[in-house]
C-alpha cells in the first residue's frame, strides 16, 4: 500500500478546497446564489456532494469564504496603490480609481459579495458586508481625513463627507459591473477621472449640508415611518 505523506495530503485537500471555491464562485455569479445547490457544485468539479461537506458544512460558508477572499484582495489592492504615493490627495485619487478598476476586473467576485442573498445566516446583507469590509472602509476614511487636513478642507474629520465620496465611487463601480460599458464612450477612464474630479470640486465648494438641514430631513424621515 502506498502511503501519502501528511504534506501531500494537506496539499490535495487545499487544492480541492480551491476547486470548490472557484466552481461555486462562478456558479453563484452566473446563476445567483439561491439557484445553486451543493450537489451541482460537486458535479461541476467531478465529486459527490459528500466531499464538499468535508470542507464546508453548508453553502453559506462557501459564500462567506468567497466574500472574505474578495475583501482581502480589495484591501491588498488599496494598500499597494496607497504605498505608491506620498501626497494624501494623490493617494485618495489613486485608491478611488483603483477600487473601481478592481471591481471592473473582478466582476464575478464583486457580484458574489455585493449581489448575494439579503439574509446571510440571520444577518442582513448590509450589516454583513459592513462588518466584513470594515478594515477597508476604515483605511479609506482615515485617508480622506488625512487629505482634508493636508489640503485645509473644512470639517476635517467629517465622516459624512467621507461616506459621500465612498458611496459615489462604489456606486460607479457597481454600475460598471452591471452595465459593462458607458453608452457613447469607449474609454471608461474618462468617466472615472471626471467623477473623481467632480467629487473633489464638490468637497471644496460645498463641504457639507448645514446641520439644521440634516436634522430637519431626518425628522421628516422619522415622521413618515410612523
Image: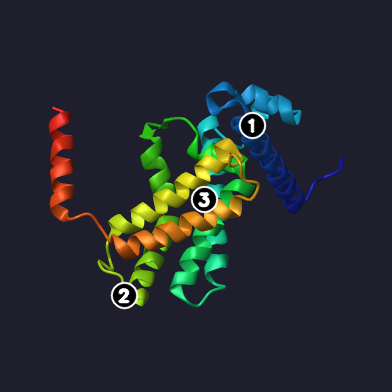
In the displayed structure image, the side of residue 183 where residue 125 appears, left or right: left
- Residue 199 visible in the snapshot: yes
Secondary element type, mark 3: helix
Q: Which residue is mark 2?
A: 152
| Mark linked to residue 52 | 1
Q: CA distance from mark 2 to mark 3?
A: 31 Å
Q: Quadrant of residue 41?
A: top right
The residue mark sitting in front, 1 or 2, is 2
Quarter in which the N terminus is drawn:
top right
Between discs 2 and 3, the one toward the N terminus: 3
The residue located at (72%, 24%) in the rendering is: 43
Pointer 1 with pointer 2, Cβ within 8 A: no
Name the image colouring.
Answer: rainbow
Labels 2 & 3 near each other (Cβ < 8 A): no
**Which one is in front in this view, the residue at disc 3 or the one at disc 1?**
3
Rendered image quadrant of residue 129: top left
Q: Indicate the position of residue 213 as horizontal and vertical percent values.
A: 16, 49
Question: Which residue sits at x=47%, y=58%?
Answer: 196
Q: CA distance from mark 1 to mark 2?
A: 55 Å
**Relative to 160, is 2 above or below?**
above
Query: Mark 3 highlights which residue?
Result: 71
Amino acid at each position: 500500500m502506498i502511503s501519502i505523506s501528511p504534506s501531500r495530503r494537506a496539499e490535495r485537500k487545499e487544492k480541492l478546497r480551491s476547486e470548490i471555491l472557484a466552481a461555486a464562485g462562478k456558479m453563484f455569479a452566473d446563476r445567483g446564489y439561491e439557484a445553486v445547490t451543493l450537489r451541482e457544485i460537486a458535479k461541476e468539479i467531478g465529486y459527490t456532494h459528500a466531499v464538499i461537506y468535508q470542507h464546508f458544512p453548508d453553502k453559506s460558508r462557501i459564500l462567506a469564504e468567497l466574500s472574505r477572499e474578495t475583501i482581502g484582495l480589495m484591501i491588498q489592492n488599496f494598500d499597494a496603490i496607497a504605498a505608491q504615493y506620498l501626497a494624501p490627495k494623490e493617494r485618495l485619487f489613486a485608491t478611488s480609481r483603483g477600487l473601481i478598476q478592481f471591481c471592473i476586473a473582478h466582476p464575478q467576485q464583486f457580484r458574489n459579495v455585493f449581489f448575494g442573498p439579503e439574509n446571510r445566516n440571520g444577518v442582513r446583507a448590509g450589516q454583513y458586508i459592513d462588518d466584513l469590509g470594515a478594515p477597508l472602509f476604515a483605511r479609506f476614511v482615515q485617508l480622506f481625513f488625512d487629505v482634508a487636513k493636508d489640503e485645509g478642507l473644512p470639517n476635517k474629520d467629517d465622516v459624512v463627507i467621507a461616506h459621500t465620496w465612498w458611496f459615489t465611487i462604489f456606486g460607479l463601480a457597481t454600475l460598471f459591473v452591471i452595465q459593462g460599458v458607458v453608452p457613447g464612450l469607449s474609454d471608461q477612464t474618462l468617466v472615472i477621472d471626471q467623477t473623481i474630479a467632480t467629487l473633489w470640486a464638490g468637497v471644496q465648494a460645498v463641504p457639507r449640508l448645514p446641520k439644521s438641514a440634516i436634522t430637519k430631513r431626518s425628522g421628516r424621515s422619522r415622521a413618515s415611518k410612523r
